[in-house]
Image (cartoon, helix red, strand yellow):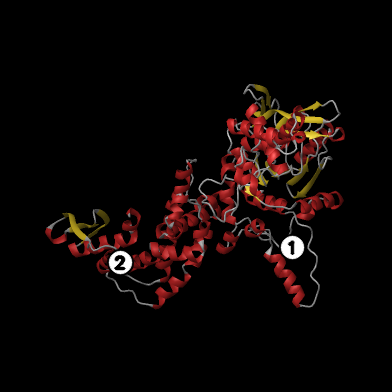
Amino acid sequence: MIFRFLQATFAICLAGGNLAAQSTPQRSPAQSSSGTPPQAAAKLPGVPAGSPSAPPTAEELVNSLGPADLQAAITVLKNNFADPDAITDTELNRAMVEGLLVRLPRGAMLLAAKENTPVAAPNAFYSELIAGQVAYVRPGSLNSGNLQALDKSLSGFAAKKVNALILDLRASEATGDLAQAAEFAKRFCPRGKTIFNLRKPAGRQDRVFNSDRDPAFRGVIMVLADGDTAGTAEAIAAALRFHNKALVIGQPTAGRAADYSDFPLPNGKILRVAVAEMIAPDGRSLFPEGVKPDLPVEMSTVDKRQVFQLSSEKGMAQFVYEAGRPHMNEAALLAGTNPEVEAAEAAQQRRGRAPEKQPPHDPVLQAQCLFYGFVSRILANGSSFSQWASRCTELTRIFNLAQNDSGVTPLEERIGYKFRNSLLLAEALTHPSLSHEAQRHHFDYQRLEFLGDAVLQLVITEYLFRNFRIEAEGQLTKLRSRLVSREALKMRAATLDLGRYILMGRGEEASGGRERTSTLADAFEALIGALYLDGGFNVAREFILTQTSADLEELAEKPVDINPKGDLQELLQSISPHSPIYELISQSGPEHEKTFASQVVWEGIVLGQGTGRSKKQAETAAALEALQLRRWEKES
């Protein structure tokens, strides 16, 4: 405590008296006669003398002093300062209190008596339906009256089958009764689960707040937070997120999640001190770290005040872009600009008209609505929110947070189909490295790739059979092999820009996974499998034929040269100096009607097998199967 006292006191002395470069324990005669104050000897570690780097601040200098240094500095000041009346015990005590208030901005504050009662902004409870099944709630102060208003709103939301709630905790001090805050959180947290704990400085757990009732709302919750979200509001946000009930959007919270007590001083002032810190259900202290958002979005204080003021007149729905108004995308949200709005205004100016004033915009609320657009589609298929809460930020990348007026995402617009079950699309675009790297539940595109490969083979085989009057089965096989080759699938995936939507581990992405042939081909086949399961065979067939139409037209115009062994040799020698080897597996039947079975082997991999009335026919059949299976790509 003495060390903190000295450190705080000396910090105030340095900052207020500008003594960092003017105090020294003892001056030499030469220095005294010159009348020139000595230069500060201290410098930042690692910064050479004469460096243009900024000099150390008073705080940095004070923090570098140990207990003995601080004691010596105080002694020097008391014994040598030109005005000894300025460094009395009262002044030192005043400096200590002032220094601690500066160094503990969230832990202690000195208030005038009239400031004793904090004013939350806004105080009043407010709720409305934003659109469809999405509701908005701004709780205001956490008191019994607002709690009753919340219950009434939640009952109304249930009657209207609302499945998503925007809980706006921005500018919410929420420093009211802790029990009231816990009651508020119980409306959303599961029964029997911890909401938050209070822990005193000694480490003893003072109070535990658990939920003793079933939640009144079971849908998705999107919490809006910012630097003014403080106190129990932070604990509520942390609890809802920990129990996989909510995602937090906006900015980091204030870090004032503590239980404060007011201590009156003799002159009427109030010293408010944090006497216990709030602990999240995972055991992490929220004081003074606060809560970090899942999706960071900036918003100025001025804009936020305007939104709250105007919402009381026309509601919150006006701050969300709707059909017929310019859309926000992820880049615009994070950059704080809106290219579509700017383009619309520029077009109006070119036509000689003054730009139409756009409605007020709340980027945090807009981000929430776009974010929910994907989450709601996930949950509409019966999946639990807890399964997806940790992955929503990643999965939202598939859709770039942007949808058109009909709710179709950019990728769905490219492929010409809107999924009824968005889980299938998410699964088709999840690389195995993501589940492995994050140690999450097994969820990737491998099973859909297996299904999609079979659907692709069937569609192409049927099309060739019906449209190419070729008698030789080998010619049809070669045509199919060309159309379903890994390189051909990669090109089609590139046309759809599929690589940008694939979710993968950081290591895989750093090694060029988004451009890798096998990755793009696998994702393309998985997409076919997802289309088959979601829309049926006809949907998958139409997609495949649309994507291969150019190749099919080219094949129809050019004759097919049948030389499977030569084609295989050429392909393999383009990636390795080794040539394929043909091995006779067996021969059966009478001498005049033998059947031969052969296999082709390359670098220890059996690429294909085939049978024929001669060894040459068997080898040709094996080469055809090798061209079709292309095992060298999958093995490598």
Locate residue 415, reporting x and y percent.
Answer: 55, 62
Picture residue at 66% right of the left edge, 33% below the top = 74
Residue 432 location, x and y as percent?
Answer: 45, 48
Few, some or many residues within 10 Å of mark 2 (<14, 14–19, 20+): some
> Can residue 83 be seen in this snapshot?
yes
Contact? badges 2 and 1 (CB < 8 Å): no
* Res. 474 mark: 2
- Residue 520 position, x and y percent, is 45, 59
Q: How crowded is mark 1: few (under 14 residues within 10 Å), some or many (20 or more)?
A: some
Toward which corner of the image does residue 124 lie, by quadrant?
top right
Q: Which amino acid does label 2 sit on?
A: Gly
Question: Left or right: 77 with respect to 318?
Answer: left
Residue tagged by mark 1?
325
Q: Can residue 188 be seen in this view?
A: no
Amino acid tagged 1: Arg
**Is 558 placed left or right of 597 in the picture?**
right
Along the line of sight, which residue is nearer the eye, 90 or 381?
90
In the rendered image, residue 614, in percent from the top left (x then y), is placed at 18, 63
Q: In this view, does 108 lie above or below 473?
A: above
State the residue in front, 273 or 465. 273
Closer to the N terminus: mark 2 or mark 1?
1
Displayed quadrant of residue 582: bottom left
In the rendered image, the quadrant that contains the N terminus is: top right
C-alpha distance separating marks 2 and 1: 57 Å
Disc assigned to residue 127: none
